Image: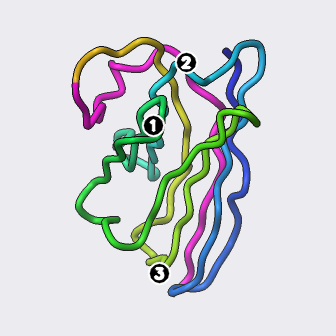
């Protein structure tokens, strides 16, 4: 599976962005997909994840109520809608996927994912 994250950009605090994760080479329909972010000098941290059928979603506490994750398996895409952006949300955002996970989430470790896309930069100005 090849993944590509897109949709990043520069936005003022309080603004919104929608990130997209596009998959090619294989369907994402049986994969858990996660979003992670990495700020300069920091580790890659979990943001959100969604199960293959979209029935369960998980979020890091700092984005709950502001971010939503959704997927369109027919289009082989996963989205991260980010509202109420804050300067501390500034980072490179990555999407990742793992097939056939048969345990409960939140799937918050980078070690749980097999496939990674190139990141997209999100910059939130104050």
Q: How many numbered callouts?
A: 3
The residue lying at 65 percent from left, 33 percent from top is: 73
Query: Of helix, strand and loop, which one carries label 1?
Result: strand
As measured in the structure, the alpha-carbon distance from the residue carrying label 3 to the one carrying label 1 is 20 Å
Q: Residues within 10 Å of mark 2 (few under 14, many from 20)?
A: some
- Quarter of the picture containing the N terminus is top right
Asked whether residue 110 is drawn in magenta, I would say yes
Quadrant of residue 29 in the image? top right
- Using the image, tell me which numbered label, if any, was put on residue 34: 1
Quadrant of residue 27 in the image? top right
Residue 79 in percent (x, y) is at 61, 50
Query: Of helix, strand and loop, which one carries label 3?
Result: loop
The residue lying at 64 percent from left, 78 percent from top is: 11
Earlier along the polypeptide chain: callout 3 or callout 1? 1
Residue 124 in percent (x, y) is at 55, 75
- Using the image, tell me which numbered label, if any, was put on residue 103: none
Residue 2 in percent (x, y) is at 70, 19
Indicate left or right for 73 with 40 as reference.
right
As measured in the structure, the alpha-carbon distance from the residue carrying label 2 to the one carrying label 1 is 10 Å
Indicate left or right for 75 with 97 as reference.
right
- In the picture of the structure, the residue carrying the numbered disc 3 is 84
Magenta extent: 104-126
Q: Residues within 10 Å of mark 3 (few under 14, many from 20)?
A: some
Q: Nearer the viewer, residue 3 or 13?
A: 3
As measured in the structure, the alpha-carbon distance from the residue carrying label 3 to the one carrying label 2 is 29 Å
């Amino acid at each position: 599976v090849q993944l590509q994250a897109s949709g990043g950009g520069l936005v003022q605090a309080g603004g919104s962005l929608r990130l997209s994760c596009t998959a090619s080479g294989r369907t994402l329909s049986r994969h858990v997909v996660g979003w992670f972010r990495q700020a300069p000098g920091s580790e890659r941290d979990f943001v959100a994840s969604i199960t293959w059928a979209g029935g369960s979603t998980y979020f890091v506490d700092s984005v709950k109520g502001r971010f939503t994750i959704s997927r369109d398996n027919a289009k082989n895409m996963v989205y991260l809608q980010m509202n109420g952006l804050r300067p501390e949300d500034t980072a490179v955002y990555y999407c990742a996927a793992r097939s056939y996970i048969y345990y409960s989430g939140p799937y918050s470790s980078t070690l749980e994912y097999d496939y990674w896309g190139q990141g997209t930069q999100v910059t939130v100005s104050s």
